[in-house]
Image (cartoon, rainbow, N blue to C red):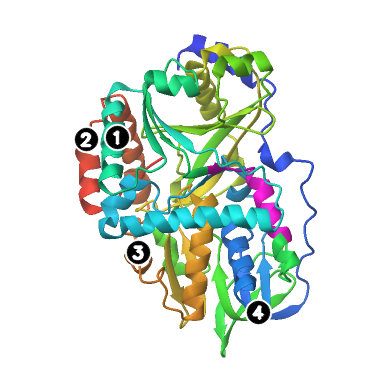
C-alpha cells in the first residue's frame, strides 16, 4: 500500500474500537455460574459456540428426558460464533464447487440436506422466539475481475446441469449494480434462498436461552481440562469441578481438541472485519442495496460484506493469517496492517462512501481443514463424538454437524451417517515447520492467482491433485 493511500484511508479507522461489534450489544446475557462440584449427566457437551449449542438443543429435542450438561471455557458465543459475518448459508460443503470436487456422487443429496438444514434453522428461530435479526436475503457472488465472469457462467451452467439453479439468477454488470452499486462489480450470481443473514452473537445467546428452557445445564467459565474413559463413562475435570458423563460431544472447533488424534487435521487461521458507522439515508441511496443481500467476491483472497440492522456495513475477509505453530491468542485479534488494507479495499469498492468512519475493527480464529468442509468421528468406543473443520461456514452447517454427532453417539444409521462426506476424513496437515511453510507458499500463490487472471501456479495445481489445499 502506498504511503499516500495509507494516510488517506487510515483516517477512517481513527475511532475504530478494537472489539467485535456484535459482542458489544447491550442485550448480552450474564454468564451462567461456573461448575464448582462433581456432576454427572447422560451427555456432556464441551464448547459453547454454535456446535455445542446446537448439539445440546437437538439432544433435548430428540429425548427430553436426556440429562444434558454443557461446559464453556469462557462465555457463550465469545469466540468465532459471536464475531463472524453472520452469513448463515445452506451449503454444507463450503460451496458447490468444493462439494462437486470431493463428493460428486452425493452433491444433489448434500445440497438438498443443506437447504432443509437452513429451513430448520429458520423454524427454530421462530419456534423459540430467538431475536437474532434473521433475514432470508440470499447472497450475490460477485465478479470483480474480468476472468471471474467466465467462472460465474461456468458455475451457473454446473448448477443447471445438476438441477440446482432454482432461485439462482446470473447477472451482468448492470444487473448487479441495479441491486448494489459499485464500479468494481462486473457480474454476479444471485442465490435468492441459499443464505440468511443473522446477528451472530444474538443467535448464540438465543440458542443458549432455548437450551436452558429445555433443561440443559450450562456452566460458563468452566474449561474442560482433559478427557479419559472411566468405567462405562467418560470423566472430564474442570478447574473447580468435574463431570462424569455417559457420552461426550466435543465442540471446541478452533481450540485444541481433547482428542489428540484430531489435532493434526485442523489449523487455526485468523479472519478480520470492519464495521462502519450507521449510514445516513443519502449514502444508503447512493449504494442501493434495498434487498439487503449478503455479498462476496470471487477472489481467492475474497471479501464478504453485508448490512446490519442499523444500516452499518460489515466488511471482512481478504487476509487469512496462520501463525507459526497454530497458536490462538487474544492479541492476534488486532492486526492494524490488515485493517488498513481492508479500509482501502472498502473505499475502492464504494468510492461514494468516502468520509464514512469505521467504529469497530476485530479479528478471530477459524478452524480450517484441508477439504474446507467439516469432518466427523467418534472415539473411546463410541462414547465421544466430534465435528470440526467448518472453515468459516459454521453459522449454518454446525446444526447439521450436531445432528451427525448425535447420530453417531446414539449408534443410529441415518441418511446423514451413510454419506461419504461423513464417513471420510481430510488429509492431515504436516508438522512444523512444514505446515507454516506450505501455508505461506499457498497464500502467496493464491494472491498471485488473483492478479494473474486466476491462473494457478505449479504449487496450487499440485495441491489440487492431492486434495490438500488452503483457502481464505
User: 19 or 2, which lies in front?
Assistant: 19
Q: Is residue 200 magenta?
A: yes
First to last magenta residue range? 196-209
Circle 1 — which element?
helix
Q: Which is nearer the N-term, disc 4 or disc 2? A: 4
Q: Which residue is mark 2?
A: 457
Residue 320 location in percent, x, y? Answer: 45, 39
- Image-based side of 39 in relation to 167, left or right: right
Q: Which residue is mark 3?
A: 425
Dot 2: few (<14), some (14–19), or many (≥20) neighbours within 10 Å? some
Which residue occupies 55% across, 27% down?
Answer: 339
Looking at this rendering, what residue extends furthest in the bottom direction?
231
Q: How many labels sit on residues?
A: 4
Looking at this rendering, what residue extends furthest in the top direction?
4
Instruction: State how far apart marks 3 and 4 are (Cα).
Output: 30 Å
Residue 430 in view: no
Which residue occupies 65% across, 53% down?
Answer: 125
Residue 13 location in percent, x, y? Answer: 63, 21
Instruction: State how far apart marks 1 and 2 are (Cα).
Output: 7 Å
Camera-side mark, 4 or 1: 4
Residue 48 location in percent, x, y? Answer: 64, 60
Q: Is residue 24 magenta?
A: no
- Report the magenta stretch's main SS: helix
Instruction: State how far apart marks 4 and 2 are (Cα).
Output: 53 Å
Q: Which is nearer the N-term, disc 3 or disc 2? A: 3
- Image-based side of 144 in relation to 62, left or right: left
Camera-side mark, 3 or 2: 3
Mark 4 and 1 residues: CB-CB less than 8 Å, in contact? no
Task: Kindly identify which numbered label has been placed on residue 66.
Answer: 4
Dot 3: few (<14), some (14–19), or many (≥20) neighbours within 10 Å? some
Amino acid at each position: 500500500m502506498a504511503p499516500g493511500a495509507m494516510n488517506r484511508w487510515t483516517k477512517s479507522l481513527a475511532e475504530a474500537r478494537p472489539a467485535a461489534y456484535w459482542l458489544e450489544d447491550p442485550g448480552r446475557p450474564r454468564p451462567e455460574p461456573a461448575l464448582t462440584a462433581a456432576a454427572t449427566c447422560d451427555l456432556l457437551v464441551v464448547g459453547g459456540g454454535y456446535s455445542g449449542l446446537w448439539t445440546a438443543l437437538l439432544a433435548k429435542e430428540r429425548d427430553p428426558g436426556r440429562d444434558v450438561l454443557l461446559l464453556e471455557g469462557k462465555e457463550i458465543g465469545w469466540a468465532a460464533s459471536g464475531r463472524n459475518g453472520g452469513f448463515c448459508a445452506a451449503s454444507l460443503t463450503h460451496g458447490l464447487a468444493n462439494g462437486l470436487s470431493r463428493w460428486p456422487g452425493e452433491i444433489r443429496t448434500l445440497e438438498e440436506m443443506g437447504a432443509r438444514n437452513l429451513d430448520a434453522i429458520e423454524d427454530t428461530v421462530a419456534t423459540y422466539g430467538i431475536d437474532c435479526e434473521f433475514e432470508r436475503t440470499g447472497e450475490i457472488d460477485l465478479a470483480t475481475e474480468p476472468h471471474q465472469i467466465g467462472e460465474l457462467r461456468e458455475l451457473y451452467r454446473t448448477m443447471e446441469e445438476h438441477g440446482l439453479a432454482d432461485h439462482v439468477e446470473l447477472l451482468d454488470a448492470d444487473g448487479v449494480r441495479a441491486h448494489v452499486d459499485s464500479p468494481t462489480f462486473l457480474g454476479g450470481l444471485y442465490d435468492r434462498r441459499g443464505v440468511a443473514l443473522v446477528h451472530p452473537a444474538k443467535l448464540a445467546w438465543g440458542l443458549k436461552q432455548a437450551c436452558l428452557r429445555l433443561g440443559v445445564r450450562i456452566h460458563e467459565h468452566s474449561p474442560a481440562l482433559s478427557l479419559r474413559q472411566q468405567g462405562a463413562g467418560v470423566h472430564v475435570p474442570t478447574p473447580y469441578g468435574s463431570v462424569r458423563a455417559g457420552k461426550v460431544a466435543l465442540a471446541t472447533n478452533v481450540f485444541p481438541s481433547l482428542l489428540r488424534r484430531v489435532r493434526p487435521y485442523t489449523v487455526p487461521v485468523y479472519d478480520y472485519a470492519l464495521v462502519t458507522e450507521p449510514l445516513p439515508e443519502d449514502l444508503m441511496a447512493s449504494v442501493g442495496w434495498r434487498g439487503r443481500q449478503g455479498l462476496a467476491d470471487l477472489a481467492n483472497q475474497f471479501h464478504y460484506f453485508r448490512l446490519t440492522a442499523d444500516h452499518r456495513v460489515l466488511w471482512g475477509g481478504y487476509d487469512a493469517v496462520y501463525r507459526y505453530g497454530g497458536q490462538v491468542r487474544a492479541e492476534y485479534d488486532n492486526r492494524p496492517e490488515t485493517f488498513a488494507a481492508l479500509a482501502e479495499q472498502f473505499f475502492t469498492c464504494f468510492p461514494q462512501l468516502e468520509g464514512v468512519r469505521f467504529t469497530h475493527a476485530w479479528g478471530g480464529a477459524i478452524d480450517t481443514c484441508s477439504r474446507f468442509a467439516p469432518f466427523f468421528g467418534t472415539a473411546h468406543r463410541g462414547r465421544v463424538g466430534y465435528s470440526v473443520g467448518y472453515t468459516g461456514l459454521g453459522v449454518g452447517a454446525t446444526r447439521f454437524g450436531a445432528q451427525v454427532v448425535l447420530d453417531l453417539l446414539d449408534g443410529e444409521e441415518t441418511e446423514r451417517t451413510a454419506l461419504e462426506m461423513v464417513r471420510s476424513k481430510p488429509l492431515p496437515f504436516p508438522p512444523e515447520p512444514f505446515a507454516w511453510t506450505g501455508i505461506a507458499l499457498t497464500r502467496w500463490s493464491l494472491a498471485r492467482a488473483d492478479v494473474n487472471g486466476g491462473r494457478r501456479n505449479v504449487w496450487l495445481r499440485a495441491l489440487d491433485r492431492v486434495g490438500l489445499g488452503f483457502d481464505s
